[in-house]
Image: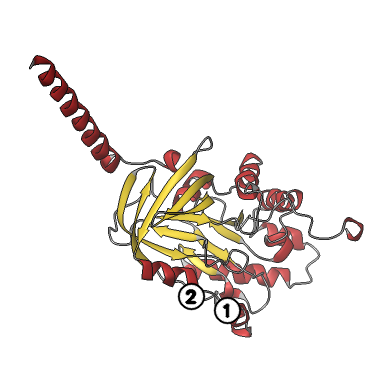
Amino acid sequence: MKTQWIHACKVLAISLCCMVGHNFLEARELTSGDIFPIDRVLDIQITVDAKDWDTIRFQSRNIFEALQERRQHAPLDHPYTYVEASVSIDGVEFPQVGIRKKGFIGSQNSIRPSLKIKLNHIDKDRRIDGLTNLTFNNNQSDVSLISQFIGYGLFNAAGSPAPRCAYAKLTVNGQSLGIYTHVERIHRPLLKRAFGNTNGVLYEGTAVDFNPGWVGSFEHKLGSDEVGRNRIQRLIDVLGSPDKDIELAIGELVDLDSFYTFWAMEGLLSFWDGYSGNKNNSFIYLNPETDKFHFIPWGADCMFERYSPSEER
């Protein structure tokens, strides 16, 4: 009888520990360090209605429509819609999140789509160390799986602000989609870490440059759009002027030391689809501390590639 009682107590204790452990996973707050580890792979479990998942998978962007002449007057349209889902990050549950497809051309895939997860889709106060959106890239253009992880790390090591990265195994409705790269969204947490402030003006540049008539083509993300557009227009005007001291004039609008580092890193890492190589995949931040633009790399899933024969370079 005593042995049975002891056994029952052990079973009860184990059950209580499991319950407490489960509740701890649900209750504990993740930090940015938890979701950007460099020594392990995140476990991301997504549960979503099957019809909604098909909606995500088969949404796409028409490249010919996207790059029509009207493109110079406005940012690219966003053809992807959020659907409600739940996600578990290393066992920590986040119900009622939003998920959608992401990507321009190179990452389009209906089997393993790149994804954005919006933590505050329903609960507007939900975030992880200030992050409300998580980005998971499918590495379709990078069979090595290392381009973003190493590339962004080298940018940061060189003093050129770039996102943090981690690896993640994604599972949707019990089906493994394999290894993705979890890339930090370029938003307030990154700006705070890199520049010490978040009250500047942020734009994303996709297939765009500082060309006459293209001031409206940069996609506004944060801050005063009026202030930012005026500054972009000033830079366009300077670049189109015959001023012999054009570098000095540009330096009044762009932090040239940081830009030279950014430009050099894109070249050294053979980032052909970045700003310097393809007028693509970059953010610009009007830093209120310097009152100048700073460039931030994005879409770095195709670094370390030889994109032209060596004899042509």
Sequence-first disc among 2 and 1: 1
Residue 198 appears in view: no
Which of the 4 image quarters holds residue 18? top left
Which corner quadrant holds the N terminus? top left
**Do labels 2 and 1 touch, CB within 8 Å?**
yes
> What residue do we see at 48% from left, 60% from top?
115
Location of mark 2 (residue) = 79
Which secondary structure, mark 1?
loop
Asked if residue 154 lies left or right of residue 305, the reply is left
- Give the label on residue 62, or none: 1
In the depicted structure, whether residue 53 falls above or below residue 29: below
The picture places residue 167, in percent across and down from the top left corner, at: 53, 45
Residue 311 appears in view: yes
Residue at the extreme right of the image, as rendered:
311
Alpha carbon of mark 2 to alpha carbon of mark 1: how far?
9 Å
Residue at the extreme bottom of the image, as rendered:
69
Specify few, some or many for label 1: CA neighbours under 10 Å numbering under 14, 14-19, or 20 or more. Answer: few
Residue at the extreme front of the image, as rendered:
1
In the image, what residue type sits under mark 1? Asn
In the depicted structure, whether residue 129 falls above or below residue 6: below
> What residue do we see at 32% from left, 41% from top?
29
Which corner quadrant holds the C terminus? bottom right
In the image, what residue type sits under mark 2? Pro
Specify few, some or many for label 2: CA neighbours under 10 Å numbering under 14, 14-19, or 20 or more. Answer: few
Which secondary structure, mark 2?
loop
In the depicted structure, whether residue 114 falls above or below residue 192: below
The picture places residue 202, in percent across and down from the top left corner, at: 51, 61
The picture places residue 12, in percent across and down from the top left corner, at: 16, 28
Which residue is at the front of the view, 42 or 119? 42
Asked if residue 161 lies left or right of residue 125, the reply is right
